[in-house]
Image (tube, rainbow, N blue to C red):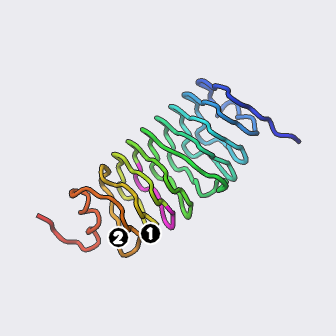
Amino acid sequence: MEKEYIEGKIFEKIDYTQTLLIAGEYENCKFNNCNFSNTSLSNIIFSECTFNGCNLSLAKISNTAFRDIKFKNCKLLGMHFEDSNKFLFTVDFENCILNLSSFYKLNIKKTKFKNTSLNEVDFTETDLTNSIFDNCDLTLTTFANTTLEKVDFRTSYNFSIDPEANRIKKAKFSMNGVIGLLNKYDIEIV
């Protein structure tokens, strides 16, 4: 069975919990204020698409392709991006809520996270080289055996990163943020 190919279409205020998104390939499409929560987006290909104001919380994304995707003002609670298709995986997040999500073992170099809540997100064994965390809340986010080389954390906060358990060469931190590198030592800085 041949998959649908949809190009350049705008999808507005559609509740995909009631009507499923047609399986296929979506290129250069815009999804505005759509609800994908708890739906299956498995095996769908998204290329150069924008999701704006959408709820994708707990969506199933097994083998879903995200190629050059922008998420703006979206709610993405509990997303397991490690289940998605890794070929050409590129995403950016702006003004999003990504809490309780996972990027386990993904290669997401040069990813931009801007004004995004990343509480309890799992970046274990993830390659984030040259990524930017601009004004992001990283409360209880896990960085374990993570490549953080040249990552910019200067405006982000509430992170705890063990320099001995992660690769942080040339990563950028503000003076206030340096405290997040010392948490494991349980010391008081006055």
Residue 87 magenta: no
- Residue 137 at what x, y percent from top left? 35, 49
- For the stretch drawn in magenta, the main secondary structure is loop
- Residue 4 at what x, y percent from top left? 80, 35
- Residue 44 at what x, y percent from top left? 71, 43
Disc 1 crowd rating (10 Å Cα; few below 14, some 14-19, many 20+) is: some
Residue 126 magenta: yes
**Mark 2 and mark 1 residues within 8 Å of each other at the beta carbon:** yes
Seen from the viewer's position, the closer of residues 185 and 167 is 167
Please tell me which residue is depicted at 36% across the width and 64% down the height of the picture: 170
Range of the magenta residues?
118-127
Please tell me which residue is depicted at 65% across the width and 49% down the height of the picture: 61
Location of the N terminus by quadrant is top right
Which amino acid, by three-letter code, is at mark 1?
A: Ala
Kindly report the distance in space between the C-alpha atoms of the residues bearing marks 2 and 1: 8 Å
The mark nearer the N terminus, 2 or 1, is: 1
Left-right relation of 8 to 166? right
> Which dot marks residue 95?
none
- Residue 153 at what x, y percent from top left? 34, 55
Q: Which image quadrant is residue 2 in? A: top right
Q: Is residue 16 above or below residue 124?
A: above
Q: Secondary structure at mark 1?
A: loop
Left-right relation of 182 to 136? left
Please tell me which residue is depicted at 30% across the width and 55% down the height of the picture: 158
Please tell me which residue is depicted at 67% across the width and 48% down the height of the picture: 65
> Which dot marks residue 144?
1
Q: Is residue 118 above or below residue 183?
A: above
Q: Which residue is mark 2?
A: 162
Left-right relation of 92 to 88? left
